[in-house]
Each structure stands twice: as C-alpha cells, then as structure tokens.
Image (cartoon, grey):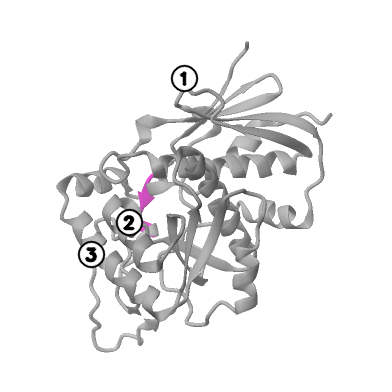
C-alpha cells in the first residue's frame, strides 16, 4: 500500500472552514489510522455554548482529511464518536486499501487550496438553477442536506430573524469580547484578519452580515461608484436530527458544498447569527416549516476570492502516538 504523508494530509485538513477560524481540532496518528479530537481550549462559550459549531467545524476538517488521504491514493473507514467515555474523541479514521479519486472528489481536492470565505460584495448575476441542483446533489454524507431558501415568505422570515439575532448578539458584552479576542491585525495563524472583514459601504444587501467589530457605514459620498445590488443564493445546511453525530455530519456536508462551489467559481460566507442562539434557531425551523435542524446558513454567489486566512502549522495540531 502507498505510504501516507501525514503532515501534508493535515495541512489540507486544516484548510477546512471553522467558526471564527478557531481551528478547534487536533489529530493523533497511531499505526494505520488517525484520531480527530476536539480542541476545547479554542471553544467560543458566548457564541457556541453547546459546542455545536465546534463539532461542525471539526466535521469539515474530517472531510478535508478524507479527501487529502484520497489524494494520496488511500481510502479510509470512518468511525464517528467511537468512545462514549472520551467526549473529545470525535472520530477515528482507519486507513484501508489503495484508491483513486472519482471525478467529483478530484474536483473537490483541487478546490481545497482555493476555497475561502468571502464577505465582500458578490456580483449581481444569479447562480443558474442547474448549478444550484448540482450543489444540492451529494449523497456521500448520510442525513445531511442542503436547502436553498427561495420562497418569498421564507426569505422575508430569514431576513427579519437574522436582523434581530444579529442585534441581540451585538448587545451582549460577552459576545463582543469574544469577537475582539478572535480579531487579528495583519497576518496570523488563526482568527479573523482585518482583510476578511470588508467595510459595508457601497452595497445593497438584505441580509445582515456579522461585522466582527467593524461598524457598518451604508452611506455614500459624492463621486463614489453605485452600490452593488446583491442577490445572493441563501442555502441552509441541515440534518434530520440534532445530535453530536449530526453536527459532525453537517460539517462534512458543509465542506463538500463549499469545495464544490469553489470548483465552480462560487464563493460563500456564513449568516449564522440566526442559528447561534436556540431561540431564533427554533423560530427559523418553525417559520420555514423545516422538518430537520438548521446547522449552517450560507450566502453564496459569484465574487472575487478573498485572501486565504492563516492556518496553524501542522506540528501544532498533529501528534503521533507511538503506541
């Protein structure tokens, strides 16, 4: 069988999206396998008191790692939550036989280095319906799905709930302190850099975005170019149930969705204020008539890829267990 370069694999796994770019994961290799473990020192107690988004972030890293190993010619078997006595052990991945990526996975692997979160304005052109169907069509991760928000009543309900949820978070001193903790000036191996939080001038958009401490200024001064009239596609990544296993699967599905989008020239950013807190999350379920649970809300569209945010070096998140 082909040998594995664990450092290279973990470097690609760590390119996964994570809440506030906290990268709350660790990898432990042992023999012919690797463990994915939660790093709860990087948790967000104000934003994510249940740890749902932490586990979801780790699920995205798990899918990136699977693809990274597939790129090295190895298939894997994944056992999620293998030890009830060890809550930080989220999954164990055992190396299986040699394998060759299929065309879809090949495109996802190629997209790992170029996928970024883009909060800047999108182009006004819509995503064609056949591309939306392509983004929805993925059967690799069980019990995790993608639902575009297209009905006018659902769109209005989401806008209103998002605005109220965003205002409530910004009024919470603990949340504001946590945001400041993860803002970064210049380059850094984690967190949200200034370059990833564009000013909100010169844009028309109905969905409130997380400001990360950058105060909005929607006015225009004389001589400025007309504001971009954004019409993003809004999608919800959800699951049938709402257990830790479902959060992990939602992260895997999110990773595949964003990588597929990146391979098609589509960028995205989260609108998760509406589901950070249990109350607006329940209201969103009720008002949209959802049978499952929303785990991630994304705005998607065509735009210019943002600079990649920093990542912790592999030696910081990778450990080898000699036993």
The residue positioned 34% from the left and 39% from the top of the image is: 50
Distance of mark 1 from mark 3, alpha carbons?
A: 39 Å
Q: Is mark 2 in CB contact (under 8 Å) with mark 1? A: no
Of badges 2 and 1, the one in the foreground is 2
Numbered disc in front, either 2 or 3: 2
- Secondary structure of the residue carrying tag 2 is helix
Q: Residue furthest top?
A: 323
| Quadrant into which the C terminus falls | top right
From what the image shows, is residue 272 above or below residue 156? above
Residue 282 - label:
2
Q: What's the magenta region?
A: 191-195
Whether residue 173 is situated above or below residue 103 in the rendered picture: above
Magenta span contains residue 193: yes
Disc 2 to disc 1, how far (Cα)? Answer: 30 Å
Residue at the location (35% across, 67% down)?
287
Image location of residue 206, percent across then percent down = 33, 76
State which tag comes first along the sequence, 2 or 1.
Answer: 1
- Is 122 one of the magenta-colored residues? no
Q: Secondary structure at mark 1?
A: loop
> In the structure shown, which secondary structural element does the residue marked by tag 3 occupy?
helix
> Can you tell which mark lies on residue 85?
1
Residue at label 3?
164
């Amino acid at each position: 069988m082909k040998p594995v370069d664990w450092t290279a694999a973990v470097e690609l796994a760590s390119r996964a999206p994570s809440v506030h770019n906290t990268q709350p994961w660790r990898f432990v290799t042992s023999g012919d396998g690797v463990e994915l473990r939660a790093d709860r020192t990087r948790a967000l107690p104000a934003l994510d008191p249940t740890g749902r988004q932490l586990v979801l972030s780790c699920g995205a890293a798990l899918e990136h790692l699977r693809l990274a190993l597939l790129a090295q010619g190895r298939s894997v078997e994944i056992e999620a939550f293998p030890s009830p006595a060890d809550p930080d052990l989220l999954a164990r991945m055992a190396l299986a036989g040699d394998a060759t990526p299929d065309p879809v996975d090949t495109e996802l692997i190629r997209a790992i280095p170029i996928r970024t979160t883009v909060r800047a304005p999108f182009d006004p052109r819509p995503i064609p319906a056949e591309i939306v169907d392509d983004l929805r069509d993925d059967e690799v991760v069980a019990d995790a799905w993608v639902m575009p928000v297209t009905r006018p009543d659902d769109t209005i309900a989401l806008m209103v709930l998002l605005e109220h949820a965003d205002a409530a978070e910004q009024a919470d001193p603990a949340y504001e302190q946590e945001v400041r903790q993860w803002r970064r000036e210049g380059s850094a191996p984690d967190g949200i850099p200034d370059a990833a939080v564009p000013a909100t001038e010169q844009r028309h958009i109905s969905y409130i975005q997380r400001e990360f401490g950058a105060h909005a200024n929607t006015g225009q001064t004389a001589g400025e170019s007309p504001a971009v009239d954004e019409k993003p596609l809004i999608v919800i990544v959800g699951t049938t149930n709402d257990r830790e296993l479902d959060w992990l699967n939602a992260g895997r599905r999110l990773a595949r969705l964003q990588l597929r989008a990146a391979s098609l020239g589509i960028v995205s950013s989260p609108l998760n204020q509406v589901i950070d807190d249990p109350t607006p999350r329940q209201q969103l379920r009720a008002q949209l008539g959802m049978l499952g649970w929303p785990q991630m809300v994304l705005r998607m569209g065509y735009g210019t890829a943002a600079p990649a945010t920093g990542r912790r070096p592999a030696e910081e998140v990778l450990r080898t267990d000699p036993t």
